[in-house]
Image (spheres, rainbow, N blue to C red):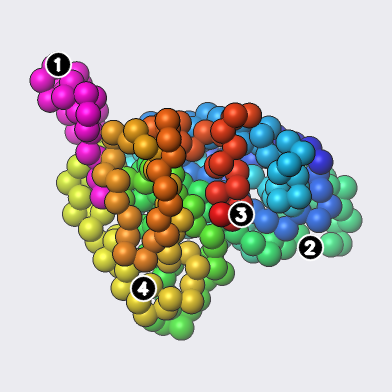
Amino acid sequence: MTYKFLELDCLSVGCKAFLSTNDFANTAVVFVHGFKGDPIKTWKDFPGIATLERHLPQWATCDLYFFDYSDVKRSIDDSSDDLKNFLNGIFPHPIQVIENLITKTRNHSQQVPIVYDRLILVGHSEGGVVIRACIAELGKGLYRDSASAILEARLVLFAPALFGFMPTSWTGLVCQFFPVRQLLEIATTLSVAAAELKDVRTLDQVREINEKLWKDFPQFQALAAHVLFGENESVVRKQRYLQDYKYQAVSGKDHVTVCKPTAAYQQPLSFVIGEN
């Protein structure tokens, strides 16, 4: 099994994809980067590590989508709408232009429709907030008897900024007492999303909606996230929603490295796919 890299410019937002050549691929994994992150570099070599022999049984049937969005010019609400539109374009049935690309990758017959049976949403830092804002908006439809298939997704978050930006340790001290703090203030002032991560009112609203939805509709998997932090987290508050699954912090990993699998650190792959 191999992956074919494609740039998808057929939707309103940017996305890069690694499509499996496996004829039986039935899972879409969507990665959402954090503030000032790169849609692919944030995750290091997820496609490459996923093709190692020990992971093939779990990952051979997965198509990987790396969603991109403007985390500077647009608000979290705007980005969550972009993500919602993107997800509706691939799950459970991809729009025609993407289906054509998948068909060519797998040498399928054009008469066989492409349908995903499973969706996994993976977020890092601000990306975790964007995903949860998206789920909150989709979840509101449940009160109108409108259940989106996306609410059945597995939700995996690495070092999510669910409770805002909170630098600690020596990095926090540097930001408080040296000129770099001024640069940080300028950067967050110019970024709507970063300002929201500092203000936290938007974050509180997203949390309250998600927690209410979970209490009213606990059967929907996407309302409870699997959350993993690095032991050396020093950028965001190390907290989860009431309903989230807690895992032991990863030794030796920080905000940036906890989501990057390597040959020596393969835990992110089993964590995303659901082996633990």
Q: Give how far apart the Cα atoms at labels 4 and 2 are.
A: 33 Å
Q: In the image, 156: left or right of 235?
A: right
The amino acid type of the residue labelled 4 equals Leu
The amino acid type of the residue labelled 3 equals Glu
The amino acid type of the residue labelled 1 equals Pro
Which residue is tagged 2?
Answer: 113
Residue extending farthest to the top is: 179
**Residue sitting at 42 percent across and 30 percent down?**
252
- The residue range painted magenta reads 163-190
Question: Is residue 187 shown in magenta?
Answer: yes
Q: Give how far apart the Cα atoms at labels 1 and 3 are.
A: 45 Å
Helix, strand or loop at label 2? It is loop
Residue 96 drawn above or below residue 210: above
Which residue is tagged 3?
Answer: 275
Decide which of tag 3 and tag 2 comes sooner along the chain: 2
Q: Give how far apart the Cα atoms at labels 3 and 4 are.
A: 26 Å
Question: Is residue 218 shown in magenta?
Answer: no
Helix, strand or loop at label 3? It is loop
Q: Which quarter of the image is occupied by the N terminus?
A: top right
Local packing at callout 1 (Cα closer than 10 Å; few below 14, some 14-19, many 20+) is few
